[in-house]
Structures are given as C-alpha cells and as structure tokens.
C-alpha cells in the first residue's frame, strides 16, 4: 500500500496535468453502458492500438468484459455530456445527447471529434484499476474541432488555437 502522503501528492500532480476527454461505451448485459475517461492514449500505429484505464464501477466492469467498445473523443460542445457520464445517476444515452449505434452494436456519438471501435488485446489489473490495451478496428471521424480538456477536476473548452 502506498503511503498516504505519496497518494495525495500523486493525485495533486495529475490534477495539474491537462488531458483530453473521452466517453467509452459498450453494450453490457443490461444495455448500453458508458463512462467518462481522461486516460485514453495512443499506443501503436502498426497495428493501430490504444489504451485506457478504468476503476471498478458497474459501467467499467461491463466495458472491460465487453468483446468490443467505442472510444468517443469529445470536443468543446460535449462538456455537459462528459459531466453526465462522469457521475452516477446522470442522464445517459438520451436522444438530446445525439447518440447513434454502429452496425456492430456499440453506441457512438456522431458529433464527437472521432469514435474509435476497439477490441481488447490485454486487460491488466493494477491496484483498484484495470488498464485495457485495445486493437482499433474502425475509426469514424466527426466534423467537430476544438478542445475539451480535463484539468484540476474541471472540463475546460477551447474552440481555437491557444
């Protein structure tokens, strides 16, 4: 177990580090599931692969166990949606949010910067999280631009160059 001071400092360090925002979706045993993630990273171009980590929520367990999922990379118009998928009990997969479904069943957000359909290559337990390394099977590019960034526990938008 990590010492509390290291754990607290670790959290504080990563709150200072801005990251992109995604909503990862899959079809679970009881229907569509999704969660907001700021841990998505490109892993390999050949073959195309990405990674993300999730904790042990019901949605996270369903995504980790799913044979495939979609990683929806969010833009500046999706701050409210990112908030909804980051909190339990918030609206999810509503018509107002603009969801669609791939022919393979995964929910995607056509208005996202991009949606990447993936299948797990590796599921690696690390402490209270699971790191998923996934093959990218399909990419749907959206028409959006701009940024949605997670920084210091807030979703921050920016439409143009910094």
Image (cartoon, helix red, strand yellow):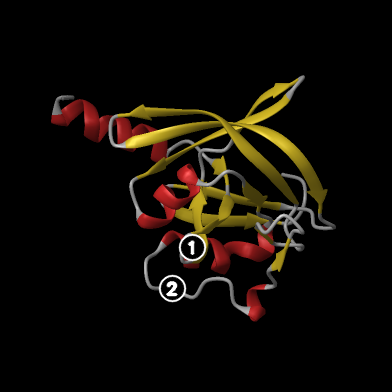
> Is the C terminus in the top left, top right, bottom left or bottom right quadrant?
top right
Vertical order, 92 against 59 (above or below): below
Relative placement, left or right, of 80 versus 111 is left
Q: Position of 90 compared to 70: left or right?
A: left
At horizontal 70% and vertical 45% (from top left) the residue drawn is: 117
Q: Position of residue 5 (x, y in %)?
A: 17, 29
Residue 85 badge? 1
Residue 118 sits in quarter = top right
Image: 23 above or below 88 = above
Q: How far is disc 1 from disc 2 in space, using C-alphas?
A: 7 Å
> Can you identify the residue that label 2 sits on?
90
User: What SS does tag 1 mark?
Assistant: helix
Residue 9 position, x and y percent, is: 27, 31
Q: Disc 1, disc 2: CB below 8 Å?
A: yes
Front residue (pair 72, 122): 122
Q: Estimate the x, y position of residue 122 in percent, counting from the top left.
A: 52, 26
User: How many C-alpha atoms fall within 10 Å of the one at disc 2: few (<14), some, or many (≥20)?
Assistant: few
Q: Give the residue drawn at x 43%, y 73%.
A: 90
Q: Looking at the image, which is closer to me, 61 or 2?
A: 61
Q: Residue furthest bottom?
A: 96
Q: Residue at x 70, y 72 (%)?
A: 98
Residue 112, by quadrant, is bottom right
Question: Whole-percent x and y of residue 137?
Answer: 74, 38
């Amino acid at each position: 177990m990590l010492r509390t001071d290291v754990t607290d400092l670790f959290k504080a360090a990563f709150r200072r580090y801005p990251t992109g925002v995604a909503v990862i979706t899959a079809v679970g045993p009881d229907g569509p599931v999704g969660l907001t993630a700021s841990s998505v990273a490109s892993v390999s171009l050949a073959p195309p692969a990405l990674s993300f980590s999730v904790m042990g929520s019901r949605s996270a367990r369903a995504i980790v166990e799913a044979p495939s999922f979609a990683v929806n990379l969010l833009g500046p118009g999706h701050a409210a949606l990112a908030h909804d998928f980051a909190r339990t009990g918030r609206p999810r997969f509503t018509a107002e949010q603009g969801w669609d479904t791939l022919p393979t069943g995964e929910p995607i957000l056509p208005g996202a910067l991009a949606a990447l359909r993936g299948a797990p290559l590796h599921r690696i337990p690390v402490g209270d999280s699971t790191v998923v390394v996934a093959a990218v099977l399909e990419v749907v590019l959206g028409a959006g631009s701009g940024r949605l960034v997670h920084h210091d526990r807030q979703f921050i938008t920016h439409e143009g160059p910094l």
